[in-house]
Amino acid sequence: MIVTLTGLACRLVAQAPQRPAAEAAEQAHAELWRRFVDRHGILLDFTALDGTVELPTPEECRAGQPNALGWWSPTENGAMFNGLYLDAAVNRWRHTRTADDAAKVRRLVAGLVLLASLSEVLGFVGRGVSTDGRSHYPLGSDDQTLPWFYGLWRYLDSGLATADERARLVPKLVEVAEALQALGWAMPAEPPFGRRGSFAGFDHGQPARLLFVLKLLAWATGDARWDEGYQAALHERGGPEGRSRLEACARGMVFWYAPTHNWTSCCEVAALRGLWELEREPAAKAAYAHGLQASADLAARSLELADRFDPADAQTFSPDWRTPMLPLWRPQTTAQQAEAVAHEQLRAFLRHFPRRGVETAFVREPTAAAWIVTLTPDESVLAARRAAVERVIARYDYARLHYSTFFWAESAWWRLTAPPVLR
């Protein structure tokens, strides 16, 4: 959904007074933990402003309702959001060193471990859980699975993880990675769906995702086979332009399925940041730095979308996802059928609750872009954009947002604030 404002309205919205970014980031943190982190330590997509949420029932998960992907439900993106939000949680802890912030980091990690322990299908990473804490939708994605690896890496690299925790987490990383490798780096789904998503290709962020997982496993295990796989994948060529994976990473983020989609593309940029931090070979490290800067430059164009958010907007939203979507449900046995049902349901959802479109266009996109901007390793470039990033962070009253997709604002703040990781 594209939401537009008149030129006058844009100017008036942009002129609204703002508070300090530090205060706004603290409110964002408080709201995330008040309303959106469930009892299992998994981030929900949306709630009512009082924290009310209508979770799918186990029966709905088994039937694929509203759809087998769980799209547009409150448990749509738990693995993705947890994994990416751990960037903020770890950096916050590095800054505060409080027991409370350490405990929050561990809650998010526990949520990730649960999401990869729900299924008998090896390598399956779930999106979220139902009211029973176990039932889930059968289709995941590469956008869920890459952040799962990224979040666990952030924890293992934080200095917080104990020896016992490492002894549990590293085998889990290996278990999931080996299962994906056995499938040619496709993401497994539960029957009857087979697979959905892949790290194996050469387009749209797949190269960074595959290389990061291989590099992470080499780092975490010390097993030479993972480094050998990384080195082999690095210069392998493919795709219509015949690029190597390293060349694709140096190009950076590219928008392809919408005018902007920072919120999903940030997964590949996170992978690039991880590769840049882990890499020691100068030429490859420089390629990753180039990709990070190119991604930040592209993302910076989306920061102005925050100025188009109207704080007084009062369009309708309700956590009742069933009313607009369930009438359009029909059985699905393939991922393509599930996506077709979901796209029909989204149109109905937006007609019922147009506030969703406002938050996805003018909150989700610019806050994800703000985090991407802060992932550049060039501190001088980041310093030049600091005011623009802080403007995005300070833009919102987070207590009045229905979706958790502002968490990138806190992530961006701690990237601006926390002590840097020296490599």
Image: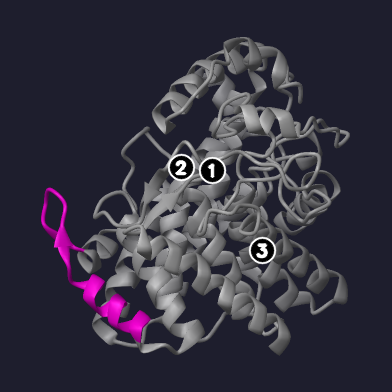
Q: Residue at x 65, y 60 (%)?
A: 112
Q: Which mark is on residue 376?
A: none
Q: Where is residue 389 in the image (x, y as percent from the top left)?
A: 56, 54
For the residue pair 118 and 405, the one nearer the viewer reads as: 118
In the image: residue 316, left or right of residue 332: right
Q: Give the range drawn in magenta.
A: 225-244
Q: Which mark is on residue 366?
A: 1
Disc 2 and disc 1: Cα gap in Å?
A: 5 Å
Task: Give the amino acid type for the residue marked by disc 1 in the picture.
Answer: Pro
Disc 3: which residue = 113
Q: For the residues labelled 2 and 1, say whether their Cβ atoms are less than 8 Å apart.
A: yes
State the SS at label 1.
helix
Disc 3 and disc 2: Cα gap in Å?
A: 33 Å
State the SS at label 2.
loop
In the image: residue 419, left or right of residue 145: right
Q: Residue at x 29, y 57 (%)?
A: 200
- Colouring of the image: one colour
Task: Give the amino acid type for the residue marked by disc 3 in the picture.
Answer: Val
Q: Position of residue 418 (x, y in %)?
A: 66, 74
Instruction: From the image, state whether disc 3 or disc 1 is nearer to you.
Output: 3
Q: Where is residue 400 in the image (x, y as percent from the top left)?
A: 78, 34
For the residue pair 161 and 269, the one nearer the viewer reads as: 161
State the SS at label 3.
helix
Q: Which mark is on residue 302?
A: 2
